[in-house]
Amino acid sequence: MPGWTPHDYGAVRVLKAANGGGYPYGNSLMVRGRAGTLLVDPSLALAEGGVPGADAVLVSHAHEDHLAGIDLVAAPVHVHEADLAAVRSSEVLLAGYGLPEEAAAAFRETLASQFGVRGRPDAVGVPDGHRFDLGDRTATVVHLPGHTAGHSGLLVEPDGFFFVADIDLTSFGPFYGDLGSSLEGFERSIETCAEIEARWYGTYHQKGVVEGAEEFRDRLRAYREVVVRRDAALTGFLAEPRSLADVVGHRFVYRAHVDEPYVPTVEARTAEQHIARLIRTGAVAEIEPGRYQAVAG
């Protein structure tokens, strides 16, 4: 079975992974113009299903599943400048996950053996609004930080295709559990996405392509609601004084059966951001160093 199948939306071709784009795979993108072809987020699926030629590669952000296929294509690699250091150095990439030493050592091996990730010191940084001119169409970088500092989408015109990368509309909700992630940055990026008019909206994982701005915004609102539920659930849990360790152990992001070495790190980073905001808004107080409680009333 091939690793991917082509699905065309105007001159945009989605290389849909055979498993639908679930991690560690993803749905790569090709934008074909008279003056060149841009390949976006070459995934593991390309290694199994054949690698199409391209004149340039864009990586939406520095995560292993988006970097897996960049060495399969003999073309310059581009990424938003805020994630450039992590693409140029696999050690910078690894450090950005914030893993404890033992877990980091294991994941270093995974990066190399499963994803084939190595540093690309030749990668090129691009700013928000950078435009790839492909002759009869353009592909414009739209900075959507929060997931990572440099996470970006791509707006292809005149086709009206907006690739939103890892703003993936899944029931899991937004992921902002790395050291360089930002809860409030992610929320602003969701607002940015809602303001962009397009015919098609494509995600890297699972949901694939959504047609129509109204349908996309409905799904985006449901996706954003996961953050609201996390706030509410955390506030409820803090009806009694709790430490960060208590919150991490309770699992507000991952279900109890998920047993991966990164889980405590992601839970902690996520909880820290929510607690900080709840303190700023007066919903939660730090009643003593390292212990938090919801404010009555």
Image: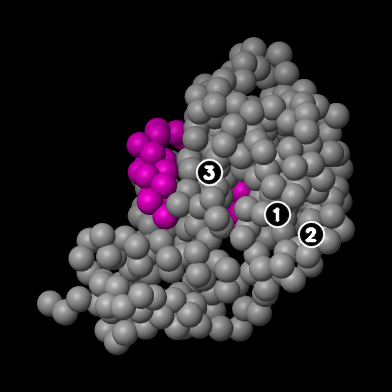
Residue 151, placed above or below residue 257:
above
Q: Residue at x 57, y 74 (%)?
A: 264
Provide the residue span drawn in magenta: 183-209
Image quarter hosting the C terminus:
bottom left
Where is residue 265 shown, x and y percent of the image? Answer: 58, 68
Tag 3: Cα neighbours inside 10 Å, few (<14), some, or many (≥20)? many
Return the x and y of residue 220 as percentages of the image width and height: 40, 52
Tell which of 47 and 11 is nearer to you.
47
Q: Amino acid at mark 2?
A: Arg
In the rendered structure, are the residues bearing label 1 and label 2 in contact, judged by CB atoms less than 8 Å apart? yes
Measure the C-alpha gap from mark 2 to mark 3.
Answer: 21 Å
Q: Are marks 2 and 3 in contact (CB under 8 Å)?
A: no
Name the residue at the left extreme: 297
Question: Where in the figure is residue 156, as x and y percent of width and height?
Answer: 55, 27
Mark found first going from the N terminus, 1 or 2: 1
Front in this rendered view, residue 53 or 248 = 248
Q: Amino acid at mark 3?
A: Ala
Q: What secondary structure is found at the residue carrying circle 3?
A: loop
The residue sitting at 60% across, 72% down in the picture is 263
Q: Which mark is residue 94?
A: 1
| 14 sits left or right of 167 in the view | right
Depicted 223 relative to depicted 258: above or below: above
Q: Which residue is mark 2?
A: 108
Per the image, label 1 sits on a secondary structure element best described as helix
The reply to whether residue 16 is in sight is no
Q: Which residue is denoted by mark 3 in the rendering? A: 149
Q: Amino acid at mark 1?
A: Leu
Q: Please tell me the numbered disc located at residue 113.
A: none
Q: CA distance from mark 3 to mark 1?
A: 15 Å
Give the number of marks.
3
